[in-house]
């Protein structure tokens, strides 16, 4: 399974928009869109995404505007 397919599965399972996933995982709201367009992740970014996927899902309020 590719990292992109893991990310897509996670977003579906948690009803999470792609921009929110990117912001929460690595601080880049364009991450998923760029991956869909062929972006290859650096090893450090790949590791951060994998760690995010393995962690408990964020609470519903995570990342909300104040």
Image (cartoon, rainbow, N blue to C red):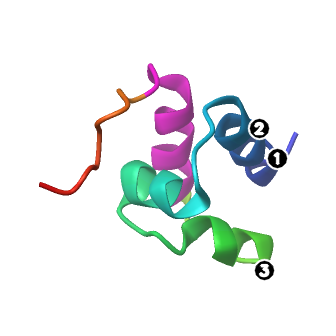
Q: Is residue 42 left or right of residue 60?
A: right
Vertical placement of residue 62 versus 38, above or below: above
Main SS class of the magenta portion in the image: helix
Task: State which mark lies toward you, 3 or 2.
Answer: 2
Residue 10 position by quadrant? top right
Give the residue at the far front of this rendering.
66
Q: Is residue 51 left or right of residue 24?
A: right
Mark 2 Cα shell of 10 Å, populated few (<14), some (14-19), many (≥20): few
Residue 61 position by quadrant? top left
Q: Is residue 45 left or right of residue 39?
A: left
Q: Is residue 20 left or right of residue 50?
A: left
Tag 3–tag 2 contact (CB < 8 Å)? no
Task: State which mark lies toward you, 2 or 1.
Answer: 2
Q: Residue at x 53, y 46 (%)?
A: 49
- Magenta segment: 44-57
Decide which of tag 3 and tag 2 comes sooner along the chain.
Answer: 2
Give the residue at the far right of this rendering.
1
Question: Which quadrant: the C terminus?
Answer: bottom left
Mark pair 3, 1: CA separation: 13 Å
Q: Do we see residue 66 in this rendering? A: yes
Residue that label 2 marks = 9
Label at residue 26: none
Q: Is residue 47 magenta?
A: yes
Residue 55 in picture, x, y percent from top left: 45, 24
Element at label 3? loop
Residue 24 in picture, x, y percent from top left: 38, 50
Tag 3–tag 1 contact (CB < 8 Å)? no
Residue that label 1 marks = 5
Give the residue at the far top of this rendering.
56
Question: Which quadrant: the N terminus?
Answer: top right
Residue that label 3 marks = 37
Vertical placement of residue 41 versus 7, above or below: below
């Amino acid at each position: 399974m590719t990292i992109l397919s893991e990310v897509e599965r996670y977003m579906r399972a948690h009803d999470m928009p792609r921009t929110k996933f990117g912001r929460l995982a690595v601080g880049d709201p364009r991450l998923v869109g760029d991956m869909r367009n062929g972006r290859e992740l650096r090893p450090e970014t790949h590791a951060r995404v994998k760690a995010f996927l393995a962690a408990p899902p964020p609470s519903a309020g995570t990342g909300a505007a104040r």
